[in-house]
Image: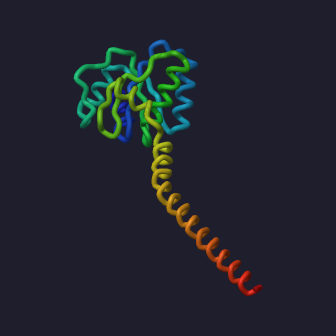
Amino acid sequence: MVNEIRSWVTGASYLILTNYKGMKVGQIKELRLRLAKQNSAFHVVKNNFFMKAVADMPGMKMAEPPDIPLAIVFGSGDGISIAKLIDDFAQEHKVAAIAGGFLDGRRFSAAEFAQLVKLPSKLELLGMLAGGLAAPVRGLVSVMRQKMASVVYALRAVQELKSKSSNK
């Protein structure tokens, strides 16, 4: 079992420790389905097996075993969006939530995860960046349009003056 846990964790870009206390079998199944759609897995593990599995893994060593009924969520990709999914599920079903974990080789506490899930998603941040980068270009286009309109108005005024002077 320790080797199996180690194989799950080894290729994962994130590992989220969750407290599954109070969750019913149906809720665990629902959470697993939601996570599977995001290419993540949810497994209930014995704390001492987990501790043995990560004991020699860089950046994942823990001083003490968690004192909660432990389930791990792991996968590759955007760990913060998975943490948001777990947090939303916990609030929706009023069950235990994230107890800590690891993202891209760095350990995060439950409090740090609580802060991370409040941040906008990666796609939202990329959208904000694109909007921020597009704003100066949009402003330049607007200024150029106004200048072109000014030139057109000036040429039209010159044309009208010439037509009036030629009519006299």
Locate the C terminus by quadrant: bottom right
**Viewer-proximal residue among 8 and 96:** 96
Decide: is 19 above or below 156. above
Q: Where does residue 61 sit, x and y in percent of width and height?
A: 25, 29
Colour convention: rainbow
Decide: is 20 above or below 159. above
Decide: is 89 above or below 126. above
**Viewer-proximal residue among 66 and 133:** 133
- In the picture as drawn, the residue positioned furthest to the right comes out as 167
**In which quadrant of the rendered view does residue 154 lie?**
bottom right
Locate the N terminus by quadrant: top left
- In the picture as drawn, the residue positioned furthest to the top comes out as 22
- Residue at 27%, 26% (x, y): give it: 52
Q: Where does residue 90 sit, x and y in percent of width and height?
A: 50, 21
- Residue at 57%, 25% (x, y): give it: 30
- In the picture as drawn, the residue positioned furthest to the front comes out as 168
- Residue at 64%, 71% (x, y): give it: 153
Apparent side of residue 47 relative to residue 27 in the rendered image (left or right): left
Apparent side of residue 33 relative to residue 63 in the rendered image (left or right): right
- Residue at 22%, 23% (x, y): give it: 63
**Viewer-proximal residue among 77 and 75:** 77
Q: Where does residue 131 sit, x and y in percent of width and height?
A: 50, 51
